[in-house]
Image (spheres, rainbow, N blue to C red):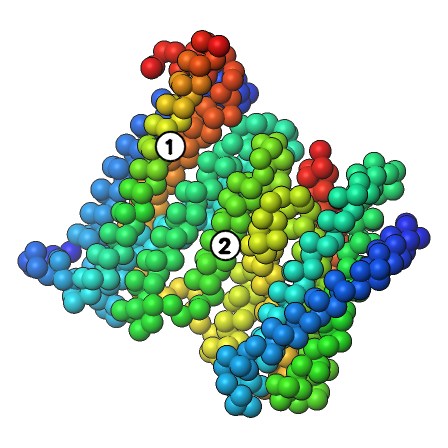
Amino acid sequence: MGKLIATVIRRDLLLAYRRRADVLTTLFFFVIVVSLFPLGVGPEMKTLRLIAPGVVWVAALLASMLSLQRLFAADYQDGTLEQMLLAPQPLAAIVLGKIVAHWMVSGLPLALMAPLLGLQFNLPPAALGVLFLALLLGTPVLSLIGAIGAALTLGLRGGGVLLSLLVLPLYIPALIFGAGAVEAYVVGVSPEGHLSLLGALLIFSGLAAPWVTALALRIAME
Amino acid sequence: MNWGSWSNFFTMGGRGFYVWGAYLITLACIIAELGMLARHKRTLRTRLTQMLRLSKQG
Amino acid sequence: MTINIFKFSSPATFYPLAGKLIPWFYGLAAILTVIGLYISFFVAPTDATQGEVYRIIFIHVPAAWMSMFIYLLMAGWAGLGLILNTRLSSMMAHALAPTGAMFTFVALITGAFWGKPAWGTWWDWDARMTSELILLFLYIGYMSLTAAIDDVRRADKAGAILALVGAVNVPIIYFSVKWWNTLHQGASVSLTRAPSMAETMLLGMLIMALAAWMYAIAAALSRVRLIMLEREKSSAWVQALLEQKP
């Protein structure tokens, strides 16, 4: 099964590479949204440092969510998804492969970009490390939960907005633990608790989301 | 619970706006839901009887 | 006397049964409301700290309880429909959603009307109210998703998945919001802002909660009858029904 997942990941990464622009737009969206907040709130460094974790996380949520449509849309349109449903291989494993590839292409760049943006907000360097770690743990959770939403809204009109409506409430625990980890560190409290909870969310969603998504795909396609 | 007078009851210790506001909004929501159910029922019946009549003619 | 419950799992037989039950439930709701309001305003005493404004809890707490209870019921019926493939179960889930959303909305508004005089702000982001707000989003999500899907079977099943995922997430969301709230407020906030409960206060809340429950059953049954008519409109029993009552 590991080989199956690796093949799916390679395929999706290759397809994403052919449409690099899509991937980059997600990243640029993230950067722009984060930059909007100082413009709206004012450039005072103390305020910015306070709101930085929340702002970066919300922007990551939104950017992640916008890229979710890409998860199944292309395969749905050209008939590959139907083949995946008919294949003898477990659908949940194929889905897991797609989610991992999606994360590598949308979530991971956000996590890597975030420390740079954190600098703009006057976060201390060690806090940037916590921010990176939190996003590294949290963005896969966003991809996993988001996949369920993407499968449920497959092919529906008004899909993007509907998807956001469904998925954003479910993102809230990840947001709370993720942003909370950085805030805790900034005030001198250990972020261990937050990060462990985030890790627990990752394990739980990693185990549950692929097969719930597979079930949702079958329902959407029957 | 002895209110003493009706005006005491209405003013609710000075917080009448909040207490009665809350109760009235709740009542409004319930009336709205019942109203929507009644309206839905009417329009559904009309539409379905029309469809029935048309299908019989045709 | 054995009752064959499966007899009523078909819309054709459940429709008239529901029709007979609805007036009884509305009646019970009305009676219980009158009793509950009497207790709330004429039996329960003035509170030492909050004065009279606490009386809002007699609708706020029952509404909050119902909003959560109905969500679980909705997810349960939807899940049943998903697993057993029974049409009526999914219809019950659709029927419950708007009523549940209504109670959630009432809980939020009455919470605000209570918060302003008692604590100074209309909204203060405490764990329970924030979770209630998120619950409203979950209801809206369910109703939006099912409305957006034209194919009834797909709508029922997709809605079921969403409702079940939501149900599993509700404790996680509540826990995370509580965590968030206590961290940001420092001191641990006690679970209930309500006044220390005199027995009559508790009784009032329970009776109003019961009244709300009876009302919810009546409203959901009314709505499910409409859903049944709409979905089964081409079947013989609906046609016969329409011919009887022009």
Q: Nearer the viewer, mark 2 or mark 1?
A: 1
Please, is residue B14 above or below residue A157 in the view?
Answer: below
Disc 2/disc 1 C-alpha distance (Å): 24 Å
Task: Give SS at disc 1.
Answer: helix
Of residues C90 and C36, the one drawn nearer to the viewer in this rendering: C90
Q: Nearer the viewer, residue A211 or C207?
A: A211
Instruction: Specify whether residue A202 is in view.
Output: no
The structure residue drawn at horizontal position 62% and vertical position 43%, both measured from the top left corner, is: A156
Q: What is the total number of numbered labels drawn onto the structure image?
A: 2
Residue A133 drawn at (x, y percent)? 73, 75
Left or right placement of residue C89 versus residue A212 in this view: left
Let me know if residue C112 appears in the view.
yes
User: Is residue C78 rendered to the left or right of residue A16?
Assistant: left
Looking at the rendered structure, the secondary structure element under dot 2 is: helix
Q: Quadrant of the N terminus of chain B?
A: bottom left
Is A83 or C142 nearer to us in this picture?
A83
* Residue corresponding to mark 2: C137
Which amino acid, mark 2?
Phe
Identify whether C232 is placed above or below C81.
above
Disc 2 is attached to a residue of which chain?
A: C
For disc 1, the chain is: B
Residue that badge 1 annotates: B40
